[in-house]
Image (cartoon, rainbow, N blue to C red):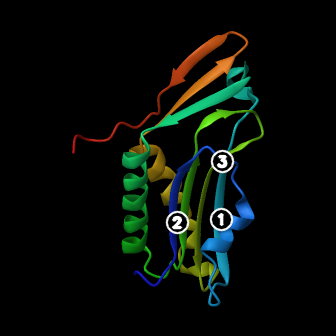
Amino acid sequence: MSEFPLFCEITYDELDLNSLLEKITLPSTGAAAIFTGMVRGETARLGKETSYLEYESYKPMAEAKMHQVATEIRERWPSVEGIVIVQRIGKLMPKTPTVFIACTAAHRDTGVFDATKYGIDRLKEIVPVWKKEVSPQGEEWVEGSHFPDAG
């Protein structure tokens, strides 16, 4: 497991998607499945405008949980080579990438798509990141729909 690249981080810095992908690309890599979450300026189904989002996190715990997600991915999809999980925090404007999750493997049919989807789903479930939506109507902390069981 340790021979494969892994990069997990909470950051205030702009996400450089190419640089992050490069961190987990090996000579044997033939496939990369990528998920990038973005700040929406509007939520059409709710008819809601978003001026910006503010993300907060307790970095040591969040990065530890990101490593847990990566370990779970490796256990379920042993063919995955590289894993990157990065969450941006701070004040983020619409059209800004907020999260980047990618898995690499030798081939596309080795589970990299499922592994990447699992990564974002688990991040939302267990990684302590809090989001405040700010709109012309005011601001509110947004809670996810999943609450993990007590550890």
Residue located at (60% from left, 86% from top): 106
As drawn, the residue found furthest toward the left would be 151
Q: Label 1 sits on what residue type?
A: Leu
Q: Which residue is mark 3?
A: 13
Residue 59: % across, % down? 44, 45
Give the spatial CA distance, label 3 vs label 2. 15 Å
Q: Residues within 10 Å of mark 3 (few under 14, many from 20)?
A: few
Q: Are marks 1 and 3 in contact (CB under 8 Å)?
A: no
Under tag 1, what secondary structure? helix
Q: Is residue 104 above or below residue 86?
A: below
State which tag comes first along the sequence, 2 or 1.
2
Residue located at (70% from left, 37% from top): 39
> Which mark lies nearer to you, 3 or 2?
3
State which tag comes first along the sequence, 1 or 3.
3
- Which of the image's four quarters has the C terminus? top left
Q: Which residue is mark 2?
A: 7
Q: Residues within 10 Å of mark 1 (few under 14, many from 20)?
A: some
Q: Label 2 sits on what residue type?
A: Phe
Query: What's the mark number on residue 115?
Result: none
State which tag comes first along the sequence, 3 or 2.
2
Q: Are marks 2 and 1 in contact (CB under 8 Å)?
A: yes
Give the spatial CA distance, label 2 vs label 1. 8 Å
- Which of the image's four quarters has the N terminus? bottom left
Give the spatial CA distance, label 1 vs label 3. 12 Å
Q: Quadrant of residue 78?
A: bottom left
Q: Which residue is mark 1?
A: 20
Under tag 3, what secondary structure? loop
Q: Quadrant of residue 49?
A: top right
Residue located at (43% from left, 53% from top): 63
Q: Quadrant of residue 53?
A: top right
As drawn, the residue found furthest toward the top would be 137
